[in-house]
Amino acid sequence: MSVRISPSILSADFVNLERDLGRISDADLVHVDVMDNHFVPNLTLGLPIVQRIQEVSALPLDVHLMIDDPDTWAPKYAETGAFSVTFSAEAAADPKKLARDIRSTGSRVAVAVKPGTAIEPWLDMLDDLDMILVMTVEPGFGGQSFIEAAMPKLAAARRAVDASGLDVWLEVDGGINEQTIVTAVRNGADTLVAGSAVYGKADGPTPNERIAALRRAAGPVA
Ligand SMILES: O=C(CO)[C@H](O)[C@H](O)COP(=O)(O)O
Ligand SMILES: [Fe+2]
C-alpha cells in the first residue's frame, strides 16, 4: 500500500482555492488548517469556508483544528461532512466526549499532539480514535523545519496501534518533504501532510507531480 498524502491548502492560493484543489487530484485527502489566533498565533479560515470547500472538493477533507474550545467547535466542523476532524490535545476539556460527539456525525476523529506533548495518555484511548496526528513543527505556520525529536513518540504510537489490532491511522504534519517523509514512514507514519512541498513553488513540477515524488520517496508501507 502507498502512504496517504494529504496536501495542506495552507500553502495554496486562498483566492484561487477551487483551482488549487483541482491541482492535487492525485492526493488521498485535503488537509485544511483551521487556526484561531488564540490556540496558535495565526489566523486562517473558519466554518463557512470549510463548508464551501466541502461543497467543491472532490477529495475527502482532513480538517486540522488548531483552535481553543474544540469541545464546542469541532462537532460543527464534523457536521460539514468532513471525512476527518482533528482536535488539538492541549485544548480539549473532555476528549472522550469530544471524540464521541465527532464520531456521532459520521466523521472520523483524530487528536493532534504538539512536539512537546506526551502521547501516552492518548495511547490509552485508541478505541476512541481513528487517527493520531504527531506534529513535527510547532503548530501555526507552514514552511517550518521538521522536528525529528518527535519520532520516538511516533514509533511508540506505531507499536501501540499494532499491538491493539485497531485500524488507527498515524499522521505526521509539519516540514514533510522528499527527505523527511522517509524518516516519518520509517517511524510508523501512514498518512503524511505536506503544504509547502506540494504548493510551495510556482515554477517546476506541478502539485500532482510533487505528490507523486513524495509517494515514490516514501515507498510502500505495510
Ligand atoms: O498544521 C500545520 C501548521 O501548523 C500545517 O499543516 C503544516 O505546517 C503544513 O505545512 P508544511 O508542510 O509547509 O510544514
Ligand atoms: Fe496541519
Image (cartoon, rainbow, N blue to C red):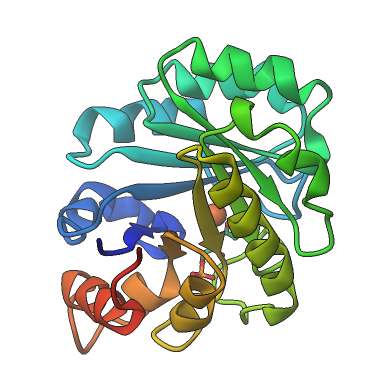
Expressed as whole percent of the image width and height from the top left, the position of residue 71 reads 72, 20
Q: Residue at x 50, y 77 (%)?
A: 186
57, above or below 210, in the image: above
Question: Along the line of sight, which residue is nearer the eye, 35 or 86?
Answer: 86
- Labels in figure, total: 0
The C terminus, quarter of image: bottom left
Expressed as whole percent of the image width and height from the top left, the position of residue 148 reads 68, 80
In the image: residue 23, left or right of residue 47: left
Residue 192 found in image quarter: bottom left
Expressed as whole percent of the image width and height from the top left, the position of residue 31 reads 42, 50
161, above or below 48, in the image: below
Residue 25 found in image quarter: bottom left
Ligand 2, by image quadrant, is bottom right
Residue 23 found in image quarter: bottom left
The N terminus, quarter of image: bottom left
Question: Along the line of sight, which residue is nearer the eye, 167 or 9?
Answer: 167
Question: Along the line of sight, which residue is nearer the eye, 28 or 51?
Answer: 28
Q: Residue at x 21, y 89 (%)?
A: 204
In the image: residue 38, left or right of residue 215: right
52, above or below 75, in the image: below
Expressed as whole percent of the image width and height from the top left, the position of residue 63 reads 48, 39
In the image: residue 90, left or right of residue 43: right
69, above or below 212, in the image: above
Q: Residue at x 33, y 71 (%)?
A: 199
